[in-house]
Image: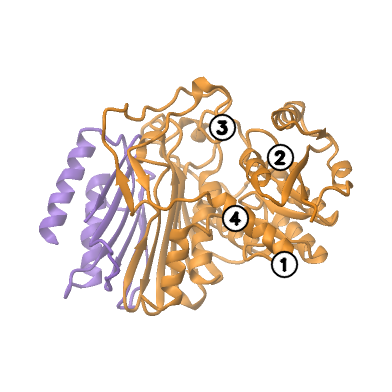
Amino acid sequence: MSKYGVLLAGAKRTHQQSHADTFAAHPDCELVAVASEKGDPEGRVAQYQELADDLGLPHFADLDEALARDDVHIVSSTPAVERRGIVAARAMEAGKHVYLDKPLAGTVADLDMMVSAAERTGVVTQMFTQNLAGWVQDAKRAVQAGEIGELRAIHAENLFSKGRAGSVPKGTVRRESENLDRYTYLEAKREMFDVGIYSLGFIHEVTGGLGFESVLGHTGNYFFAEHMGAGVEDFGVMMATLEGGVTATVLGGRFGWMSHPLSGPQKVVVVGTEGTMSFDPFALRVEVYNNEPDFVQPAVDPYDPMGMWGASHPAYAPMPKQRWMALGSRNVMADDVAAFVKAIDDGTQPDMNAKRAAALTEVILGGFISAARGEEVSLPLPRG
Amino acid sequence: MADHLEALQQVVQEAIDDERLGQPQFVRCVALAPEGGSLDSSLEALASMGESWFGGPAASRTRRGEGSGVYLTEVSTWDTGQGALITVSATGGGGTADIDLMVVGSRGTLYHRA
């Protein structure tokens, strides 16, 4: 069988770097090209070119020209949040299977556009999650096997231990806005949006896809002056009501290099009529204490001050955190991409397809509205 | 559990007073109610710890699970921007800790699990 050709619709200093590495390592895939959009700003086009140069691939400055190629079967779509809807929809309309960056998009209109294109074309779509991680699957199996009786409540959290925390001025109080018109900054991202989606994915996976009926959100500027300056949150909490009256709580955020011994806390707690169980990828670990130097936060990378992507120069690369060694950890993106490729092979739709990913992303958009209004918001959000 | 919580409250307060966390910003706590104890009183005990660390009562408290007899979950927010998420359950087992606490500060985080 010939390999699936993968078009990279995303620049350097986006998740495309890890997507590209993962697709390149898949035995049934090969990278074909990098594509930007006509009209992209010059600086952004340079980042696409930089990725193409790194990977030794051609760079098409016209996405539609790249999508017309017969040797492109899959599009790995990681443009800026503001362009995710239109880029993914165009890829689907061109008949390409689409592996989607998370969260799906920043507006309800963009979410609807993607879902509509996916349903109209029938191509295989999947948003990246960490749902196939062993500890998440353990939680799912425990709930499905009835080990806690009937599920009543679930908590999921995911926090990134990156960035130099402590710069936010004392007394900062975040006032959330309903007008989510910008997501992309050099120095900041919306972190309840960007990291909280993983927690929502865990809830989707463990509950078997229970729908969200309402959400209450609270966002904070707790750690980083950069986030406060950009007007975006660095931390958020949501409490939601799921089908059947199940309560779900979610934490997502970025809280600093020094706030966790590894990459940041991840956890799922399920509460049932017969028991409560907690799942954590680091619960099974060894701890190593020796005369190796302790972790020290890296110098601030001028091209990536929050440590979102790879360091722009070795001088800014973080040293490894080595005190904790988790047992049985795997490359979750490799497993996720493998599941996506298998779905293409089998002609099936992945569980986290565009429609389901859109519904989870909409929970976060509802969380922002709730945080701005100070009241619970019903889901789905109103259209038009 | 009362002795445990009292000691925990004190040591967290010491960490805050010594500015080891920076500004205390968020509390996440998942706990089991003691056998024979009420969910409500357990949650109130934990909520009062958060209020002591944040220096005053929450401005809003939204609770779920009332009447379930299985759990209570509460999200609290303060006018000064802080927040808390507390869940107390009546059903244990499966290696669940009696208390799993995370106190998030502006420049550091404190963890306690027992």
**Residue type of the residue flagged with mark 1:** Asp
Looking at the image, is mark 3 or mark 4 earlier in the sequence?
Answer: 3
Q: Please, which chain is the residue tagged with disc 2 on?
A: A
User: Viewer-proximal residue, A340 or A24?
Assistant: A24
Kindly identify which residue carries mark 1.
A346
Kindly identify which residue carries mark 2.
A10
Q: Which quarter of the image is occupied by the C terminus of chain A?
A: bottom right
To which quarter of the image does residue A20 belong?
Answer: top right
Looking at the image, is mark 2 or mark 1 earlier in the sequence?
Answer: 2
Kindly identify which residue carries mark 4.
A336
Marks 3 and 4, how far apart in space? 21 Å
Residue lying farthest left? B3
* Helix, strand or loop for disc 1: helix
Looking at the image, is mark 2 or mark 4 earlier in the sequence?
Answer: 2
The mark lying in front, picked from 3 and 4, is: 4
* Image position, residue B55 (x, y; %): 25, 44
Marks 2 and 1, how far apart in space? 27 Å
Same chain, marks 3 and 4? yes
In this rendering, is residue B104 above or below A187? below
